[in-house]
Amino acid sequence: MFTKGDIESMVGSAKNGDKNAVENLCNGFKGFIINSARKIYIRGYEMEDLIQEGYKAIIMAVDSYDAARNTFTGYAVNAIRNNFYCIMRNNLSKPYSASLNSINNQGDELMNTIFSDENIEEYFESLETKSSLKKAIARLSDREKDIIYWCYAAEKSMKKYSEFRKTPYRTVSYRKKKAVEKLRKFMEEQGEI
């Protein structure tokens, strides 16, 4: 900690171009700058950026400080706050967009911080799979489409299908097996399996 006299002396030296005095002043206000930076959010600014803006405010305060009017400590504190508020006001009107793949301070993708019961990746994968399945089913014969629809879409048994179509159960079982094999082959050709 510096005394009031030390600070005023460093400000005088800094005004005369002493870089060590400027650095000591910045280090003296470092805790206040970090504490202030933690309390605010400015779009597009990382914590390190905000700290640098605080240091910049100190340097500008040294140049404009008038010892006859007030103390440097109070002047610097107000300069830091005003600088942060000015940056916030200037950024309010700027449109903001971010990629869902951008990384936050904790190293997580923005996508992973969105709370939802839905898994978007699985949803789009299922859409692709459904599309591929529709294409594969379109390649089946009408008889094969009928047995697939009956067993999988309508969720009815092969026994009922056999009775409804008046076809031996063994024939129905064979048709279903062949239709499923064809579907699997078509899906493999499309790269879905």
Image (cartoon, rainbow, N blue to C red):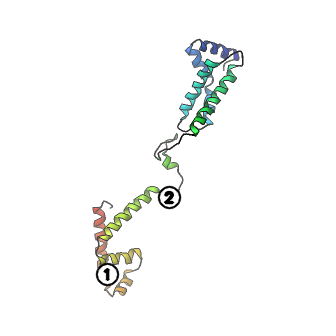
Residue at image coords 58%, 33% = 87
Q: Is residue 15 above or below residue 78?
A: above
Q: Position of residue 128 (x, y in %)?
A: 38, 61
Residue lying furthest front? 93
Indicate the quadrant containing the N terminus: top left, top right, bottom left or bottom right: top right
Helix, strand or loop under label 2: loop
Residue denoted by label 2:
118
In the displayed structure, 144 sits above or below 116; it is below
- Residue under label 1, please give it: 172
Residue situated in front as seen by the camera: 140 or 191 = 140
Image: 160 above or below 19: below
Q: Say which residue appears at 35% left-offset and 68% top-offset.
A: 134
Is tag 2's residue or tag 1's residue first in the polypeptide sequence? 2
| The image quarter in which residue 158 lies | bottom left
Q: Which residue type does callout 1 highlight?
A: Val
Q: Position of residue 114 (x, y in %)?
A: 53, 51
Q: Secondary structure at mark 1?
A: helix
Q: Quadrant of residue 168?
A: bottom left
- Are the residues at dot 2 and dot 1 in contact (C-beta closer than 8 Å)? no
Q: Nearer the viewer, mark 2 or mark 1?
A: 2
Residue 193: x %, y % from top left: 32, 61
Tell me the quarter of the picture where residue 153 sits: bottom left
